[in-house]
Amino acid sequence: MDKFLESRWFLRGFALLVAVLMFITVNTEEEGTNTSANSQNDVEVIESVPVDTIYNEEELVVTGVPNTVDVTIEGPTQFVTRTNAVRDFRVFINLADLELGTHEVELQPEGFSSQLTVTISPAVATVTIDERITEEFAVDAEFNQSIIPEGYELQGIESDPETVQVTGARNVIESIRYVRATVDIEGQVEDEQTIESTVQVLNANLDKLPVAVEPQTVDLNVTVSQPSKEVTLVPVTSGTPADGFELDSIELTTETVTIYGPTDTIDNINEIEVPFDLSGVSNDGSRIEVPIPVPEGVTSLSSETVAGVISLTESAAGEGAAAEDESEETAETPSPEEEEEPAEDTDNASNDNNESTEELTLSALPVEMRNIGDELQTTFLSPASGELNLRVTGEPETLEELSKDDVSLFVDAEGLEEGEHEMEVQIEGPSNVTYILSQSSITFSLATA
């Protein structure tokens, strides 16, 4: 028995048997493993897969092909996972052999493993194949009225370039109704401005059309202007001069003013009446400066004020009174010859004084409130406008150079609390003239802001 076990042939046979058993065992395990792996399937939806279209792009235009589709893949997990990760596939639609017209065409997958089941959604597309044409269209400029400042008018909008080339399917090109560019800016156009704008191509329903535009943008040159017109100033008087004087004439320093505003408004205006208050004026040659009223609808004037030189004459009543005074003076004077020369000097002095001074009225000067604090606000009660007239008397040369900018009216409200107050108005200005206010004090109220 021992010799048999030690036999060479026995050992060889035993080794062969063991090898066969091992081979069978290994194959059985591999088959079981493969069977197990194959039994584990997975499903994945890959969204927004782009669609490639095959056709003659130079001569044809295709519509109706979806830009993207959803692709569902089903199969062994390792194939599904790899396909979703690498994405070395595509979905395409082949129109190369189709004629002009509308067709139902199936979308096709490419590059997927044969182990996978592929489903495309949508699976079929309704496409239209049409002739590609290019036509030239003029660009219409559009704008919102809000970009035009008040009192201004649009002079024109020019597109650069004036036309564009539009390429698309013949039926789409034939449906074009509007090729336009819109002025899209924040704020308003001042004088002249250039705005870049995208060209839009629309049909009659204002739907944007699938076409190619060259160039895609244009420059819109917008020009606005302020219509103007020169009109006559007409002085209108109110009040009466001082006792003993009558108005002879008013000579305006400028007889016209330029008005600005909408054309339909200023076309109906030919003159502006300017009010002059002559109450108490007693010096011949007085110069009164007043604001020019702004007519309704007019946005601005070339000048806000105008000055008038007042010419006065002695009234009949004044001459009679003067003659009566002279008669009384002669009767009471015992030595008229001795008094005649001083009287002549007095008259000359009076005439010299009248000739050496003039009057200037500055109208509607605002009263400034000083030192009221940030927490209080002012409401004017008398006058409600918070403006006063100021009569200035002085040398003609001084008054000639004097303007509203040289004089300030103010009230010092430091320490005042809430409530109603009456305060004296103070004047800041040149010291070589005399000032008379239309009223010496104003009434106002202070309240918490």
Image (tube, rainbow, N blue to C red):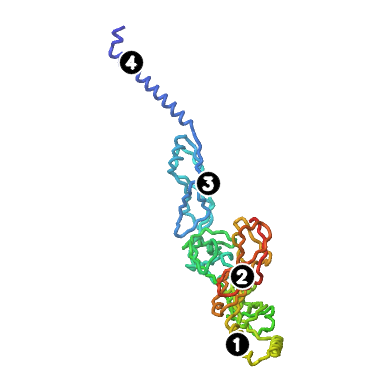
The residue carrying mark 4 is: 14
Residue type, label 3:
Ala
Residue at image mark 1 = 345
Alpha-carbon distance for marks 4 and 3?
Answer: 63 Å
Front in this rendered view, residue 409 or 294: 409
Gap between marks 1 and 4 measured at Cα: 168 Å
Q: Is residue 356 above or below residue 372?
A: below
As measured in the structure, the alpha-carbon distance from the residue carrying label 2 to the one carrying label 4 is 131 Å
Number of residues whose C-alpha sits closer than 10 Å to that of mark 1, classed few (under 14), some (14–19) or many (20 or more): few
Q: Position of residue 219 (x, y in %)?
A: 48, 65
Q: Amino acid at mark 2?
A: Leu
Give, as a three-letter code, the residue at label 4. Answer: Phe
Question: How far across and down, in percent of the image, does residue 425 sit?
Answer: 63, 67
Secondary structure, mark 3, is: loop
Q: Position of residue 187 (x, y in %)?
A: 55, 62
Q: Distance from label 2 to label 3 (Cα)?
A: 83 Å
The residue most toward the bottom is 337
Please identify, in this view, whether the residue under mark 1 or under mark 3 is nearer the observer. 1
Label 2 packing within 10 angstroms: few (<14), some (14-19), many (20+):
some
